Amino acid sequence: MRSVYSLRGFNIRLALSIFFVCALALTIAGCARKEPEQPKEEAPKAPAPYVMSFPLGLAAESVVVPPDNPMTEEKIKLGKRLFFEKKLSTDQSISCASCHIPEHGFSDSRQFSAGVGGKTGTRQSPAAINRVFSAAQFWDGRAKSLEEQALGPVQNPLEMAMPSMDVVVERLTSDPSYSSDFKAAFPPDGAITPGNLAKAIASFERTIVSGKSPFDRFTAGDKTAMSEAAQRGMKIFRDEKKGNCETCHASFNFTDENYNNIGVGMAAKKPDLGRYEVTKLEGHQGAFKTPTLREVANTAPYMHDGSEKTLEEVVAFYNKGGYRNKWLSPKIKPLKLTKQEQQDLVEFLKALSGEVTWYGK
């Protein structure tokens, strides 16, 4: 018969064995059990390149897009939102679209656009269409690019009147949806900066184009696209001895992108000297940028000061040779057109308005 001490020792050994076996089993089970994987943060998708499609009559090879601001879907989408965003004005009442109205060829039907508090300047809002074919912007060409132009109205006290771009950045940063939109447009950091804001707005503006006008369709072979009066007007427009209009309104976009003094506003006691205020070069006094004639039937009033209310008035102004002044361009001379020829020229100008499209439309 075993002693009590022997049984007790056996039981202790047995208990220890069972303990170690269970511990080993738990250790093995713990090693075998997989820890739940932490969700990986997805890297931001690379922006999708945006390939523009142009309506009939426009030259895709003539686009002006800076190498450091390539067109992308996400950037344009953000730019469109910013173009219609009233948060960019100090009292949140004015957006870019308030003065560049889509229904008016992205211009303003008022002589002078009203900014914050109803303040107005002395120049008419230029049409924002077909800016993808232009480098310098504004009537006086003071902005060298659309990117530079985009920030001008935001801080202009007569327009959106923001005290500084820092306030703009702070306002947009406080909106979580803008943080995500900027991150998608400008990966990887998606910084909300004045530079990125300008790039986005400029990218959207480059999608605003007008083409496929009766003139374009006529030129492409549809001889019924323009009326007989418009066809006669086209000949006057091109004739060097008649309208001689192509001397300034050249190329497919009907502008030479140059600056000329045609006499508008020069009768004032203190005339707007236009391009001269930018360059300080003699001969640039009273010179303003030649605007595109695309959508001209829908972008009244006309001239840099909105002084001509109708196309008939514009043609009559040119017909008399503009307004004589010391710096009048030698291109401007009395046309001596008959009433019928003037009206034919107006009909041709109307035939330059066609289909306006932009991103999302």
Image (tube, rainbow, N blue to C red):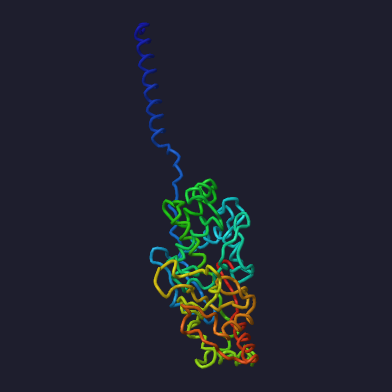
In the displayed structure, 308 sits above or below 346; it is above
Q: Quadrant of residue 10?
A: top left
Whole-percent x and y of residue 151?
A: 48, 58
In the displayed structure, 287 sits above or below 69; it is below
Where's the C terminus, which quadrant?
bottom right
Q: Is residue 135 left or right of residue 158?
A: left
Residue at screen point 47% across, 57% down:
185
Near-viewer residue (228 or 224): 228
Q: Is residue 288 left or right of residue 301?
A: left
Counting the numbered discs, the total is 0
Whole-percent x and y of residue 330?
A: 46, 84
Residue at screen point 62% across, 85% down:
346
Q: Quadrant of residue 145?
A: bottom left
Where's the N terminus, which quadrant?
top left
Whole-percent x and y of residue 170?
A: 50, 46
Whole-percent x and y of residue 181?
A: 51, 54
Near-viewer residue (170 or 292): 292
In the displayed structure, 63 sits above or below 172; it is below
Near-viewer residue (147 or 308): 308
Near-viewer residue (30 or 251): 251
